[in-house]
Image (tube, coloured by chain):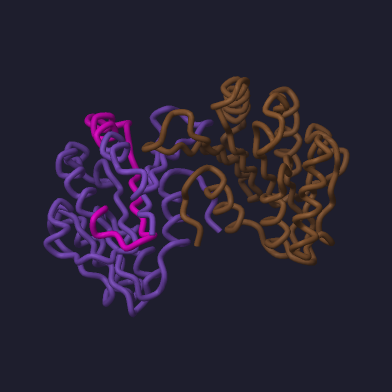
Chain colours: A purple, B brown
């Protein structure tokens, strides 16, 4: 069992509880492919993971990881920004994972863009199945990070409480700049 | 499946994931017995729920509910404040649930006392098994509520990050006074 040590482990905890074999899910920012790999494990051979990234090296890294794990068959890799989500994915999504900021080990000036992120989140929220969730890992330690986090929180706070449960999860005994998680759940 | 609509459903979500049949768990504030009932279901006949409340009517209500559900056998009801936890419970606790504020439907001037609560939380943290959790539902809408919540957050923020993961969960699209949850997890 993973302990809840950080925003990504907490997001995995919610994804593991919610995602079932056969589900359709989205990794909006596949990066090095770690979230894609978890999602591919959870949906199994009957499910589908849509994995987006605007950077070719992220798509290549994710392809390599999933191939190693023998789970590439259930993954659709899309080399495009997540703001194009609704062009590819149809409604009924069980979970969409967003891991914002920059590609780990990559160019730190190449960061997710708040306007694109908010557009993608809006599309993901509309594509969710009842009881479907969006996990959003947020980083405020890099340039542009606080502004992106504020934009995401503003978007999330405006979601109708009759349609969505929206939680912000922060670690009380870690620095203010520690990554944190926003969770959006569509009410069934 | 319960949706994550409020602090208590979110606490139940964590308890359901973590508590296994045969475990020893604590309901530090049994109130009307709803948390005790969930915990009794989760630990099963081989497990033990220690349920504390300083108010006789809370103990009576919990006994009645658990009897109706046929799960009284695995529950030890203790009519005492939770600050006496360590007098009764031995180490190895999988989960301890705290639901602060006042007894639902009871006397709203009879509220949990911050000093007792902090004492009880400290005892619970030391009794936890590795990977054990404490869930703390906090209410700031009644007199004394904000002070108690501040005391709990101060206690939680001071827990050593090498020993405990500490999360605060708030709903972004609800009023500031909405109940919220603090989760403490002992790192294994």
> Residue shown at 38%/59% (left/top)?
A188
Q: Nearer the viewer, residue B166 or A124?
A: A124
Tell me how many marks there are. 0
Percent x, y of residue A156: 30, 40
> Residue shown at 80%/49% (left/top)?
B50
Percent x, y of residue B160: 61, 32
Percent x, y of residue A152: 27, 38
Q: Quadrant of residue B139?
A: top right
Q: Is residue B165 left or right of residue A153?
A: right
- Verify whether residue A147 appears in magenta: yes
Percent x, y of residue B140: 55, 27
> Residue shown at 36%/55% (left/top)?
A133
Q: Nearer the viewer, residue B12 or B155?
A: B12
Q: Is residue B46 above or below residue B181?
A: below
- Verify whether residue B98 appears in magenta: no
Range of magenta residues = A125-151
């Amino acid at each position: 069992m993973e302990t809840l040590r950080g925003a990504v482990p907490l997001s995995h905890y919610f994804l593991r509880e919610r995602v079932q074999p056969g589900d359709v899910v989205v990794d909006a920012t596949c990066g090095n492919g770690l979230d894609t790999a978890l999602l591919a494990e959870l949906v199994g051979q009957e499910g589908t993971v849509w994995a987006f990234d605007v950077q070719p090296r992220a798509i290549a890294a994710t392809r390599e990881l999933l191939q190693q794990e023998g789970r590439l068959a259930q993954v659709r890799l899309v080399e495009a920004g997540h703001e194009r989500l609704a062009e590819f994915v149809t409604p009924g999504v069980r979970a969409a994972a967003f891991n914002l900021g920059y590609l780990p080990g990559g160019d730190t000036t190449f960061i997710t863009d708040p306007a694109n992120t908010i557009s993608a989140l809006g599309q993901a929220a509309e594509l969710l199945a009842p009881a479907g969730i969006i996990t959003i890992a947020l980083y405020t330690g890099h340039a542009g990070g606080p502004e992106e986090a504020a934009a995401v929180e503003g978007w999330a706070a405006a979601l109708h409480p009759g349609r969505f449960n929206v939680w912000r999860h922060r670690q009380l005994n870690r620095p203010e700049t520690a990554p944190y998680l926003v969770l959006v759940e569509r009410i069934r």
